[in-house]
Amino acid sequence: DLYGKGRGAATRLQKHCAMSVLGDRTLIDGCDFKVHAFGHGIHIHGSQDTVVRNVTMEGVLRLTDEIYREKTGLAAKYDHKMMYPPWLKGRPIPKGKMLSLTEDGIRAYLDGSDRDGNNRRTGHITVENCVVKRMRGGITITMAKSGTVTDCVVLESGGHAYSIPPNGVVRDCKGDAGFSPLLSMPYSNRGNADIELELVAAEEELGDHPLAKVVGNGHRIRITSSGDGRPETLRPIILGTTGDRYTEENTDLKALRRHSAASRITLVNETPHPVHLTRFASNNEVTTRGRVKDEGVDNEQKKP
């Protein structure tokens, strides 16, 4: 994952995904996946009305510090620097982080072809009573047209736990933020998701990542916490950032503003973690018992 995919990659990949879904009204029920190859668990292309139910999925993680011990191979060849994604090319592999050796657990792509070769947008996805552990992204259906996620658990993700499409609904779901954010909403054109998540304590924590990264508009997000104590590491819920994907270092200000915009979001934070409203956050309503850093415009703060 650090050395490229597709044209211009530093190495040629031989991806092995567990299941590819192309047809309509597919039901995946009661399956147990062990993913020990680089690829997605279940990936969905252009399908309509896909249901994933009662599925367990587990991938593999590796501590980045171990990579620095390698004397041969790609990491040694490139002086332990990343070559992918493009906006991180040339940076040292970060130490003290957990790297996923797989891709996403349940992943939606934007579109795909039907049996007649006609391209179409990926439709609604329902995910029910699933457990995803140690995958790069857990339930990553943000590119679908819509989605409903209920009664799911995502643990020890290497990239993020949940990523939800426009008009998506999440209920009775939980996850940790030990190695990566609990929630990632990375696209500014995505709006009106209705998300309720419970943060559970991680068995181990590594890295300086936030609790959540959110852009878009009109979302309703409520994050609760299963623990009463103060966590060892405070991780901000950030409205108005995509992380490293769009920064002043790798894009122009106009694109940065467009991609990072977060507006009209209602956030209820019932965890001890802080909230950060970046300069790209505007007209949001935040209810939180933690501290707030507000660099945005016309944001409203409330106490619960």
Image (spheres, grey):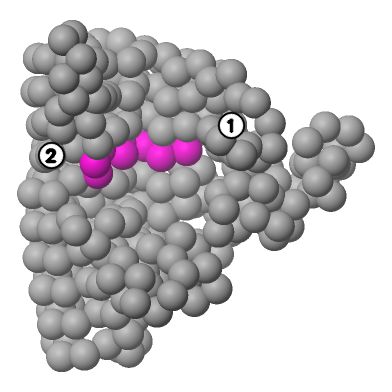
Quadrant containing the C terminus is bottom left
Task: Give me the residue at 31% from left, 66% from top.
Answer: 259
Residue 88 lies in quadrant: bottom right
Residue in the image at 46% along x and 60% along y = 245
User: Which residue matches tag 2?
Assistant: 145
Q: Which residue is label 1 attached to?
A: 101
Q: Residue at x 16, y 20 (%)?
A: 118
Q: Is residue 78 left or right of residue 226?
A: right
* Amino acid at pointer 2: Lys
Spot occupied by residue 9 in the image (x, y as percentages of width and height):
63, 37
Q: Is residue 286 left or right of residue 209?
A: left
Give the secondary structure at mark 2. loop
Q: Is residue 161 visible?
A: yes
Give the magenta range. 135-143
Q: Quadrant of the N terminus?
A: top right
Q: Can you see residue 95?
A: no
Q: Residues within 10 Å of mark 1 (few under 14, many from 20)?
A: some
Q: Position of residue 156 (x, y in %)?
A: 47, 41
Q: Secondary structure at mark 1?
A: loop
Q: CA distance from mark 1 to mark 2?
A: 28 Å
Residue 24 vs residue 64, the one in the foreground: 24
Q: Residue 119: percent from the left, percent from the top?
A: 18, 25
Left or right for 30, reference 104: left
Single out the residue that lies furthest toward the right.
71
